[in-house]
Amino acid sequence: MPSSAQTTEITYYWLATIVTDNGRQITSSSTVPVVPGVHTRMTTVNAVMAHLKEQYGNFTVLFLLLEPNEIGTLSSPTA
């Protein structure tokens, strides 16, 4: 049974620019839940691709960004 650390969900932000089969260029973004130890980078990208295919049909990826949807603590520069 996975530990609680492995089942803690992390939200990832994705941004993709695609070209559909009819030549339409689209940029789309959203978030996707990821559970470390359960999901891999590949399964997460596949989930994003499935979402885009459901929305737009067949397409070619021009750009894909996938990263944790959090902003770390900003530190101020020291004098």
Image: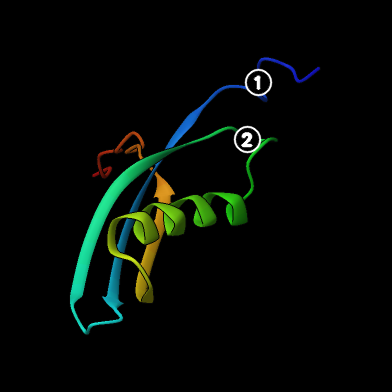
**Location of the N terminus (image quadrant):** top right
Q: What element carries label 2?
A: loop
Q: For the C terminus, which image quadrant?
A: top left
**Would you call the spot at circle 2 few (<14 residues within 10 Å), some (14-19), or many (20 or more)?**
some
Please say if the residues under marks 1 and 2 sit with CB atoms less than 8 Å apart. Answer: yes
| Residue under label 1 | 5
- Taking the image as shown, residue 56 lies to the left or right of residue 4, namely left
Residue at 41%, 40% (x, y): give it.
32
Location of residue 20 with respect to 28 vertically, above or below: below
Residue drawn 35% across the image and 58% down it: 52
Q: Earlier in the sequence, mark 1 or mark 2?
A: 1
Question: Vertically, is 36 above or below 51?
Answer: above
Image check: 40 left or right of 28?
right
| Residue 42 image point, x, y percent | 61, 57
Q: Is residue 3 found left or right of 73 in the rendered image?
A: right
25 shown above or below 4: below
Measured Cα–Cα span from mark 1 to mark 2:
8 Å
Residue type at mark 2 is Pro
Which one is nearer the viewer's eye here, 37 or 48?
A: 48
Counting every numbered tag in the picture gives 2
Element under label 1? loop
The residue nearer to you, when weighing 77 against 37, is 37
Instruction: Find the residue positioned furthest to the right.
Output: 1
Residue sticking out furthest to the bottom = 23
Which x, y percent locates residue 63?
Answer: 35, 73
Badge 1 amino acid = Ala
Which residue bears the numbered disc 2? 36
User: Percent position (x, y) of residue 76?
Assistant: 25, 39
Residue at coordinates 29% horizontally, 56% vertically from top-left?
55
Q: Image height check: is 18 above or below 4?
A: below
